[in-house]
Image: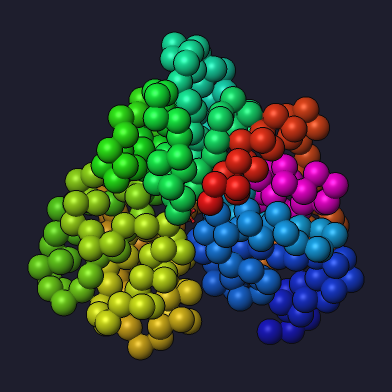
Amino acid sequence: MGGDTDFEAKIQELKRSLNAVILAHYYQESEIQDVADFVGDSLALAQAAAKTQADVIVFCGVHFMAETAKILNPTKQVLLPDLKAGCSLSDRCPPAAFKAFKEKHQDAFVVSYVNSSAAVKAMSDVICTSSNAVKIVNRAPKDRQILFAPDQHLGRHVMKQTGRDMVLWPGSCIVHEIFSEKKLVQLKVEHPDAEVVAHPECEQAVLRHADFIGSTKGILDYVVASPKQKFIVVTEAGIIHQMQLKAPGKTYIPAPPDNGCACNECPYMRLNTMEKLYRCMRDRTPELILPADLQAAARAPLERMLEWS
Ligand code: 13P
Ligand code: SF4
């Protein structure tokens, strides 16, 4: 690659001149993962954002992740390649409707999944991610009803793991809800030597076929450590890039969705491209801007999550 398309070299140069750190989620395209300083799941990215010494955080993920980085670093500039990179889970939990839901359960302890807006976080007692949800719910006061939002499937999985009864917000992710149980069972028959690894945002009908259920990092660590050689991967296909880097000799089969596509990609995550990443660093825009009072209100539940993790 050369000239105007040599984004990798230009991004590396801008990283140095801006004293920037690039944080990327596993669902980003491979080139973005390769140019990032740190690749992780939502919890690891929030932890990395909380302790960075860089002046500028370039967040290659979706909006709620960049928002989290900003809330934890109010004095730093947070850039993201595409402001429109949202999240269906977050969109399906509008703050006004969530406020009404909370008012119906006034004494409840509110645990919100990090895939939510800053306004929803601000109305919560503590935040969780898929990798620490069980731990966080286990620490919730035993004498209080728990409200869990916005992902009902993660909520059901956590209820099973903790034995805690929770009132669930009826949200779901457009990527994880369309995995097909029927096609997954067919794949298992074709590959009886494969283990099934799945993200807890999948429906129960799919999760019951999984050998391992975990966050993106949990799934990655599991396949690297497993003595098995073949895996059916039931989450966004971007994670397979790190699997191939960390355990190159193994076989990874993306689980089929029910919509006829060959693989499953998050349309929001995939809005980010190398070109947009380069341009956002060059022009220092788009920048994540969030009112200071909203940041302050959402900070306490996020910091409680980091403390409890
Ligand atoms: P992880 O925290 O497991 O990376 O999940 C983030 C996400 O958006 C899953 O769809
Ligand atoms: Fe949101 Fe689903 Fe995309 Fe994750 S995969 S960012 S939950 S829409």
| Total number of numbered discs in the rendering | 0
Which residue is most to the right?
17
Left or right: where 200 falls relative to 36: left
Residue at left offset 32%, top offset 83%: 250
For the N terminus, which image quadrant? bottom right
Give the residues in magenta: 66-82
Left or right: where 284 falls relative to 252: right
Q: Nearer the viewer, residue 60 or 280?
A: 60
Residue 256 rendering spot, x and y as whole percentages: 27, 59
Residue 269 rendering spot, x and y as whole percentages: 54, 54
Q: Nearer the viewer, residue 260 or 166?
A: 166
Q: Is residue 54 magenta?
A: no
Residue at left offset 77%, top offset 76%: 12
The answer to whether 195 is drawn above or below residue 136 in the figure is below
Regarding residue 268, the answer to whether it shows in the image is no
Residue at left offset 72%, top offset 59%: 51
Residue 233 rendering spot, x and y as whole percentages: 32, 65
